[in-house]
Image (cartoon, rainbow, N blue to C red):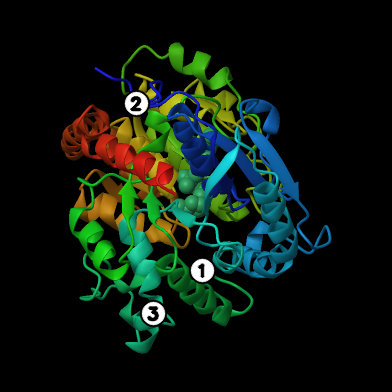
């Protein structure tokens, strides 16, 4: 059987794809994975990127990298208000990006024939640049299809009065977006709330004007949402996920991965006995929440591997807020790292549950490895993903309320050692089998990747 990861459909044929990721971990990772997938299909790859959060080019000697200035001063940008950040960059990057793309196009040769630009949809200004240079632009949306549609529906949600959120209505169902409740709607805090709406409108308009959409998703998981997306965005749509299962090569991680946790997992005797805990690359908790999490983990009596990203506890550099002797007191039941090799961790036989913020990459990675989840969304699409995980796919449980040690402790036991957790694990196994099938020869993602390759060659 053909291995889609390593069998280019054609030998190298001089066709180049130019990719422009948004400089945030959750967006860079899938864009670089897509680049690896396309490279394996025979395309040359050029990555245009900002200096801000630039990817580690030394990990990708087979790609060409073109940095462009951010156009803002150090200190003007922070991922804490990333709507403000991307709003700023959609203005400051126009000139540098246009110059860079124009140069790449004018330097084309018979060995390097640029055929398509693929950008994150948040870079909405790039559609106008592509039009001006008469060059096709496709879009890689790095979220689930369901959360993307819910995101696009925010102006309607505002019109219908669901937003701004009112405490008294949080538990109400949203009939326009089942299975979501009002509290699951994308709330992204920004200094100017109008920026969020402006961003959605600009994204959606330029996606409709693009040459096509690519999702890190698979058809069988969200069939009705995919159909809805096709109706709403009448351009070619390709679902070729989960990318990380098709992409061979480094992880795209901006932080160094601490591999010590793999040897720690190797030492665990019981399969599926460890809870992996990670809240992604942007989430920040207060010191009080951090302590509730720590005590919830400790009191659950379960083994855990916990990623505490530097500066992810407000006011601390790393673990200063932990009571002294906390880890020692666990007798080897817990291990904490700054950043883990997450794909290896989730695929490890000792891991039996994932306490996650439900960023889309993490959610899809857990599904691909059949690991049931304990969901604690922080913002944006994470809330939608969590609701789908708990209520639609039923492969996880939802920590819906205040971060509180007793609730955490109970939820961990429900996930790791109860019958309810076992049922979720069984449903997850079935979902994982679907993932395996969609990637195989003739499977939905396999076919979609074939079509995408042919489409890109046609430009
Ligand atoms: C952000 C948003 O939070 C998310 O909601 C959106 O869907 C994408 O952008 P992020 O918070 O980084 O993403 O979460 P996620 O999408 O899960 O991506 C994190 C990536 O970092 C995953 O690919 C994960 O494998 C990787 N990771 C995480 C590590 O490699 N090591 C870690 O220790 C933690």
Occupied quadrant, residue 227: bottom left
Which mark is nearer the camera, 3 or 2? 2
Q: Circle 3 sits in a helix, a strand or a loop, which is it?
A: helix
Which residue is identified by label 3? 167
Q: Which one is nearer the viewer's eye here, 376 or 42? A: 42
Q: Is residue 225 left or right of residue 14?
A: left
Whether residue 400 is visible: no
Which mark is nearer the camera, 1 or 2? 2
**Real-space CA distance between mark 1 and mark 2, rounded to the nearest whole angstrom:** 37 Å
Q: Is residue 222 above or below residue 112?
A: below
Q: Position of residue 377 (x, y in %)?
A: 42, 55
Q: Circle 1 sits in a helix, a strand or a loop, which is it?
A: loop
**Number of residues whose C-alpha sits closer than 10 Å to that of mark 3, classed few (under 14), some (14–19) or many (20 or more):** few
Q: Which one is nearer the viewer's eye here, 375 or 128? A: 128
Whether residue 27 is visible: yes
**Number of residues whose C-alpha sits closer than 10 Å to that of mark 1, classed few (under 14), some (14–19) or many (20 or more):** some
Circles 3 and 2 in contact, beta carbons < 8 Å: no
Question: Earlier along the polypeptide chain: callout 3 or callout 2?
Answer: 2
Question: Earlier along the polypeptide chain: callout 1 or callout 2?
Answer: 2
Which residue is identified by label 2? 4
Q: Is residue 316 above or below residue 351?
A: below
Q: Is residue 444 left or right of residue 282?
A: left
**Real-space CA distance between mark 1 and mark 3, rounded to the nearest whole angstrom:** 16 Å
Q: Position of residue 75 (x, y in %)?
A: 81, 60
The total number of labels drawn is 3
Q: Residue at x 40, y 37 (%)?
A: 243
Which residue is identified by label 1? 188
Q: Position of residue 247 (x, y in %)?
A: 44, 29
Occupied quadrant, residue 47: top right
Q: Quadrant of the N terminus?
A: top left
Question: Earlier along the polypeptide chain: callout 1 or callout 3?
Answer: 3
Q: Position of residue 424 (x, y in %)?
A: 20, 39
């Amino acid at each position: 059987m053909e291995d889609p990861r390593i069998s280019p459909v054609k030998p190298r044929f001089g066709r180049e794809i130019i990719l422009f990721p948004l400089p945030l971990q959750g967006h860079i990772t899938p864009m670089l994975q897509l680049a690896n997938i396309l490279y394996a299909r025979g395309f040359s790859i050029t990555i245009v990127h900002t200096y801000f959060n630039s990817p580690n080019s030394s990990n990708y000697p087979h790609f060409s990298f073109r940095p462009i200035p951010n156009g803002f001063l150090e200190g003007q940008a922070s991922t804490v208000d990333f709507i403000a950040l991307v709003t700023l960059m959609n203005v400051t990057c126009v000139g540098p990006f246009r110059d860079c793309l124009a140069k790449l196009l004018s330097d084309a040769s018979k060995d390097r024939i640029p055929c398509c630009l693929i950008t994150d949809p948040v870079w909405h200004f790039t559609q106008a640049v592509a039009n001006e240079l008469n060059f096709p632009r496709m879009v890689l949306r790095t979220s689930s299809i369901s959360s993307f549609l819910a995101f696009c529906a925010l102006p309607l949600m505002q019109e219908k009065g669901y937003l701004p959120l009112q405490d008294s209505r949080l538990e109400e169902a949203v009939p326009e977006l089942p299975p979501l409740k009002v509290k699951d709607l994308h709330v992204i805090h920004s200094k100017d709330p109008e920026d969020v709406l402006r961003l959605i409108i600009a994204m959606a308009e330029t996606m409709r004007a693009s040459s096509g959409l690519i999702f890190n998703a698979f058809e069988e998981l969200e069939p009705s949402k995919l159909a809805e997306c096709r109706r709403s965005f009448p351009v070619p749509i390709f679902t070729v996920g989960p990318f990380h299962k098709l992409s061979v090569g480094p992880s795209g991680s901006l932080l160094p991965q601490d591999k010590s946790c793999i040897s720690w997992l190797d030492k665990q005797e019981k399969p599926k006995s460890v809870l992996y805990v990670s809240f992604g690359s942007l989430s920040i908790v207060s010191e009080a929440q951090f302590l509730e999490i720590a005590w919830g983990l400790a009191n659950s009596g379960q083994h855990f591997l916990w990623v505490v990203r530097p500066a992810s506890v407000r006011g601390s550099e790393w673990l200063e807020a932990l009571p002294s002797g906390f880890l020692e007191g666990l007798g080897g039941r817990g291990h904490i790292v700054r950043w883990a090799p997450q794909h290896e961790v989730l695929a490890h036989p000792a891991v039996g549950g994932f306490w996650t913020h439900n960023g889309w990459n993490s959610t899809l990675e857990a599904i691909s490895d059949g690991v049931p989840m304990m969901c604690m969304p922080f913002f944006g699409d994470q809330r939608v993903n969590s609701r789908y995980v708990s209520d639609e796919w039923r492969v996880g449980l939802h920590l819906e309320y205040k971060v509180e040690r007793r609730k955490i402790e109970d939820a961990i036991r429900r996930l790791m050692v109860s019958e309810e957790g076992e049922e979720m694990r069984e449903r997850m196994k079935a979902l994982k089998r679907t993932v395996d099938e969609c990637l195989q020869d003739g499977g939905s993602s396999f076919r979609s990747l074939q079509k995408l390759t042919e489409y890109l060659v046609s430009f």
